[in-house]
């Protein structure tokens, strides 16, 4: 698969939907808390916004933002992972406004990502979780 093709995610699913009260966690990929520098570019503006991730998985990330974008907003993310910079496309699937009881920011579903970048994030998650963890 080349950059620009969809990552391995079934149509109609994403890792950042908030389950209804009482439902078990439904994320498709395990996630880890990890603060990475991320540059965000939105179609509506030329400006690049720099922020930090709160957590990350193979399928998406939660990114701190003082003025979170609304759900459905598309963006290009440049994630700084050590010496590598991963460029992925994503869409906001969760928006947490200031004062809602959590750090403000956006849950972003990765919609287009190179396979080697999916593997890099996956191996980082598996390494941090350790054996036998992250099955849900």
Image (cartoon, rainbow, N blue to C red):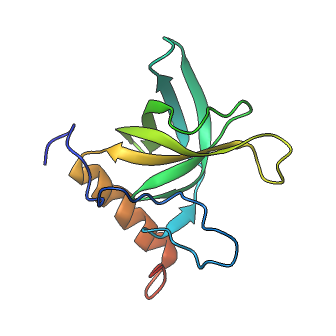
Residue at the limit of the structure toward the left, as seen here: 1
Q: In this view, does 99 lie above or below 42?
A: below
Q: Is residue 113 above or below residue 12?
A: above
Image spot of residue 111 (x, y percent) = 35, 45
35 relative to 78 in the view: left or right: right
Image spot of residue 2 (x, y percent) = 14, 42
Q: Which residue is drawn at 13% across and 49% down?
A: 1
Q: In this view, does 57 lie above or below 111?
A: below
Quadrant of the image occupied by residue 66? top right
90 relative to 92 in the view: left or right: left
Residue at the limit of the structure toward the bottom, as seen here: 132
Image spot of residue 130 (x, y percent) = 47, 80
Q: Nearer the viewer, residue 65 or 50?
A: 65
Residue at the limit of the structure toward the top, as seen here: 46
Q: Residue at x 44, y 82 (%)?
A: 135
Q: In this view, does 30 lie above or below 78?
A: below
Image spot of residue 13 (x, y percent) = 39, 59
* Number of residue marks: 0
Q: Which of 88 and 86 is in front in this view?
A: 88
Q: Residue at x 48, y 79 (%)?
A: 136
60 relative to 104 in the view: left or right: left
């Amino acid at each position: 698969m080349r950059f620009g093709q969809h990552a391995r995610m079934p149509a109609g699913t994403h890792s950042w939907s908030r389950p209804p009260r009482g439902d078990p966690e439904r994320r498709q990929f395990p996630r880890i808390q990890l603060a990475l520098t991320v540059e965000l570019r939105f179609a509506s503006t030329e400006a690049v916004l720099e922020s930090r991730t709160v957590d990350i998985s193979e399928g998406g990330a939660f990114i701190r933002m003082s003025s979170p974008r609304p759900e459905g907003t598309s963006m290009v993310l440049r994630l700084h992972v050590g010496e590598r910079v991963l460029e992925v496309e994503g869409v906001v699937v969760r928006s947490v406004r200031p004062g809602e009881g959590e750090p403000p920011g956006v849950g972003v579903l990765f919609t287009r990502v190179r396979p080697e970048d999916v593997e890099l994030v996956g191996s980082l998650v598996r390494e941090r979780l350790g054996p036998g963890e992250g099955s849900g």
